[in-house]
Amino acid sequence: MKRFLFLALTVLGFLTLQGCKKSEKLIYHHKLGKTEVVLLSDGQNTGDPSALIGASEEILNEFVPTGTLNSAFNIFLLKIDGKKIIVDAGMGFHLVDNLASEGLQPEDIDMILLTHMHGDHIGGLLKDGQKVFPNAKLYISEKEVAYWTDKEYMSSLPEGQQRGFIGAQQVVETYKDNLVLFEPQEIENMQDLIPGVKSIASYGHTPGHTCYMVENGGDKLFIWGDMINIAAVQVPHPEIPTRFDVDPDMAAATRAHILNYLETNKLNVAGMHVEYPGVGKLVRSNRGLELKLD
Ligand SMILES: [Zn+2]
């Protein structure tokens, strides 16, 4: 756990520990037809916008006037036709406790869909080197696994940057019998990965980053993972990357393209670092596109 906390804080350096309310267990229910989407909060945080690359003074004054941002670590539980599915696993601070509040044990989870393999999204998958979810199939895009398990590339990096790779490799190795690798599609051509959930290629934040769209009875929710890290700034200004993006230019192009689709199609959205309740709508005003929380 300590290692993953370190990784997560490395990845999300903009969060301050003072603002980290780790003890806060928050749950939020969102209905999509017969499907239930449950936010299981792994913690709410505050931080500053220093992780943004190239945000002008003017943009920061407009969109972060107090200099403080609210953030979170979110996991989404999907209840689809009797199946229990989680999207990402956070750092594991509250995941097992939050599942218990929903009447579930880790053994009850049938599937895990990962957006990507940064430490703050996979930390909850292992405890003492063992699987936390022994019965779950673990879905990860092929490209994502290829990146994090490329030992030759890893050894070319400074030691500090290798830790994230080692953590991801431990997950891949420990869950090797549960792994399902897949290729997500472009948003215009998204396909069912499992019944009721489509996978969308959203590369840039990491090389295999994947978003998911949950759909039932005409109701839809787009889970953007870390396609956006700082919604207050990156929704109106998708061209601004963060230093957590592996490929900042690709991340910016992906963000602009997918946000345009989401706005055009009026999709509700959810994100892994969107403050409670983690779910909202995109609305356009004279300030540009913004996220309005539920
Ligand atoms: Zn993250």
Image: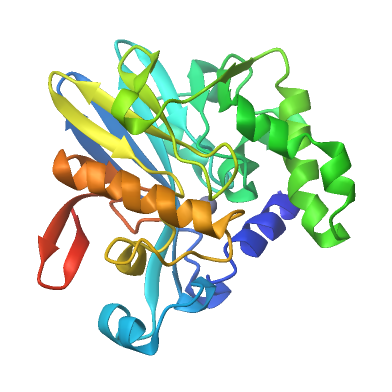
| Residue shown at 13% from the left, 18% from the top | 217
| Residue shown at 34% from the left, 69% from the top | 233
Q: How many marks?
A: 0
- 2, 144: nearer the viewer: 144
In the rendered view, tell whether residue 154 sits above or below residue 96.
below
Asked whether residue 10 appears in the rendered view, the answer is: yes
Residue 146 image point, x, y percent: 71, 31
Residue 246 image point, x, y percent: 62, 54
| Residue shown at 24% from the left, 37% from the top | 29
Residue 245 image point, x, y percent: 56, 57
Q: How is the image coloured?
A: rainbow
The answer to which quarter of the image holds residue 243 is: bottom right
Left or right, 7 with respect to 219, comes to right
| Residue shown at 39% from the left, 36% from the top | 76
- 270, 98: nearer the viewer: 270
Asked whether residue 102 appears in the rendered view, the answer is: no
Residue 86 image point, x, y percent: 45, 29
The answer to which quarter of the image holds residue 126 is: top right
In the rendered view, tell whether residue 16 sits above or below residue 127.
below
